[in-house]
Amino acid sequence: GAVVSQHPSRVICKSGTSVKIECRSLDFQATTMFWYRQFPKKSLMLMATSNEGSKATYEQGVEKDKFLINHASLTLSTLTVTSAHPEDSSFYICSARDGSTNYNEQFFGPGTRLTVL
Amino acid sequence: TQLLEQSPQFLSIQEGENLTVYCNSSSVFSSLQWYRQEPGEGPVLLVTVVTGGEVKKLKRLTFQFGDARKDSSLHITAAQPGDTGLYLCAGEDTGNQFYFGTGTSLTVIP
């Protein structure tokens, strides 16, 4: 159980275009999902916390107009990188919190490698 | 502010050796998780510890939560190449805020 999928796994786009990344909890309902950014061999940097049916809470320094997050259902959250630039190239990972467990563990998707040319 | 510091940051050892990774904080956590992440993939949950002094074993991996619930360690016995990866600790504080450690990149050389 506790499987989280992400799509796409890799995306290459031109500078100035927008890219949407989907995160789905496959076998549980996730009232809370998280979006992270990760650089090579570094830990995860939390970008935003997404609660179903409400606006996302962004971490300091993360532009909410650039990284649009929508959490429309208990199993789906999307991150849209708008007007992408080469500095947005990174590994983006989502996670979902399974509120039915005792410890509120987070389960992670496989990540999306974004390359902006 | 980085609440959870991991050490060492990088570790390269020979197959068969033992190693310990530390996760330290000045804050108290209600629970602490350890994850392993392989390149190009998401982190995979290894264990959750919740009680001060708790020890959990997962085959050759031994996890310990400090008595004061501020720190944790991961000990690997007889490391194998398949243990290679980025190890991350993560703690949840009493306000349900989740913090990741700085990460330990482990390479086990055959």
Image (cartoon, coloured by chain):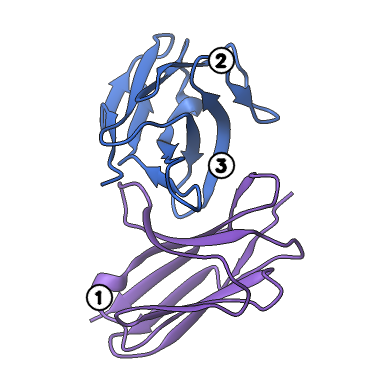
Chain colours: A blue, B purple
Q: Is residue A105 above or below residue A63?
A: below
| Callout 2–callout 3 Cβ contact below 8 Å | no
State the separation of the CA atoms marked 2 and 3. Answer: 22 Å
Secondary structure of the residue carrying numbered label 2:
loop
Circle 1 crowding by C-alpha within 10 Å: few under 14, some 14–19, many from 20: some
State the separation of the CA atoms marked 2 and 1. Answer: 44 Å
The total number of labels drawn is: 3
Circle 3 crowding by C-alpha within 10 Å: few under 14, some 14–19, many from 20: some
Residue A108 in the image: state x and y as whole percent. 37, 43
Is residue B62 found left or right of B39 in the rendered image?
Answer: right
Residue B36 in the image: state x and y as whole percent. 38, 61
Residue type, mark 3 in image: Met
Q: Residue visible at 36% across and 16% down?
A: A20
Q: Which residue is mark 2?
A: A54
Is residue A103 found left or right of A65 in the rendered image?
Answer: left
Q: Nearer the viewer, residue A102 or B92?
A: A102
Quarter containing the C terminus of chain A: top left
* Chain of the residue under label 2: A
Q: Which mark is residue B81?
A: 1
Residue type, mark 2 in image: Ser
Residue B27 in which image quadrant: bottom right
Residue A107 in the image: state x and y as whole percent. 39, 45
Please tell me whether mark 2 or mark 1 is closer to you in this view: 2
Residue type, mark 1 in image: Pro
Residue B109 in which image quadrant: bottom left
Q: Residue visible at 42% across and 41% down?
A: A98
Dots 2 and 1 on the same chain: no
Residue A106 in the image: state x and y as whole percent. 45, 46
Q: Which residue is mark 3?
A: A45
Q: Residue visible at 32% across and 82% down?
A: B60
Q: Residue visible at 29% across and 23% down?
A: A12
Secondary structure of the residue carrying numbered label 1:
helix
